Amino acid sequence: MAVPTYEEIMPPTLAVLSNCDKYVSSKELDAETIEVFGLTAEERAERTPSGNSNLYKNNANWARQYLKHAGLIDFGYQHGGKRGTYRATDAGRVFQAEHPEGFGVDDLLVFPTFAEYYGGKHGSDDKQSKPKSTEESEQLTPPEIMEKAAKEIRDALAEELLQVVASMDDYDFEFLVAKLLVAMGYGQSLDEPTTVTPKSNDGGIDGIVKEDRLGFDNVYFQAKRWDKDTTVTKPEVQKFSGALNGQHANKGLFITTARFSEGARKYVETVSGQRIVLVDGVTLAHLMIDYNVGVTEEKTYVIKSVDTDFFEG
């Protein structure tokens, strides 16, 4: 099964705490609720999309936050107990007894403190007026919502960036590729960072970069500014391979604003004596974003979470 959402983790969390008269540590609580869902070792180890934290523990933490805002559980450190521990309140035990089959966020809205908190975070609780996408987003924790939004912004930026790049002059595009490779750490020779070959005598090679700062080896590249819906086929890549042979080279980069056919990709995996890397338009746009080529930073958001190991250590 998929790692449960915070809403799915709330009922077993309250059930475990309602059956215990003492404060329970997050480690013990996670262990018991994980058993309820029967998660595999792989599912238990799954990370959040950002890779910064364990997905189950992240969702479990938000489940406890929601239960706390509803007044159904207490945090130990707020009542003289140990940090990183939790206990059901009297209201929590009553609520648990009234919902033996489980409950969700909608059921918590009867508590004014939660309704105020949740309303401020999500807006109106009118389920009839909410679009499906909004209802689905409520299954995500705030960090997951931000990560989803960040991905959508990034994908939209990549699409816009690719359209701008596709409108460039061919020669300017070759220089753009050279700048990108330098930004990625290639072409850092002490003598010359990169070379774009003259159009009149490129021999199928559009540019040359050094593999490292000492210039031990050359990497030859071909940059093709084609329509993004164009498919680069195997014969085009074979021509590039032949151009590399003409330079007695074994390392090449074919980079384009278009896309590659399956045949082209399989060819570079089997060609003997050469290492050819294919970069399509979508990958090109994302590399430009990653290495700040042709883009500028507007805002930065930092998301922090509770370090439970610090409090339980």
Image (spheres, rainbow, N blue to C red):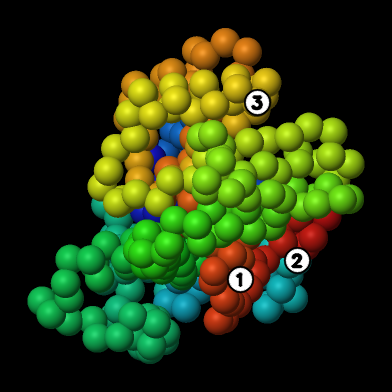
Q: Residue at x 71, y 73 (%)?
A: 77
The correct choice, above or below, for 295 with respect to 211 in the image is below
Disc 3 packing (10 Å; few <14; some 14–19; many ≥20): few
Q: At 74% across and 48% down in the image, what residue appears? A: 187
Residue 265 in the figure: left or right of residue 175: left
Q: Which residue is mark 3?
A: 247
- Vertical relation: 260 (above or below) 53: above
**Residue 128, percent from left and from top:** 10, 76
Q: Which residue is mark 2?
A: 82
Circle 3 sits in a helix, a strand or a loop, which is it?
loop
Label 1: element kind: loop
Quadrant where the N terminus lies?
top left
Q: Answer with the quarter of the image where residue 115 lies.
A: bottom left
| Residue placed under numbered mark 1 in the picture | 303
The residue type indicated by label 2 comes to Lys
The answer to which of marks 1 and 2 sits earlier in the sequence is: 2
Q: Are marks 3 and 1 in contact (CB under 8 Å)?
A: no
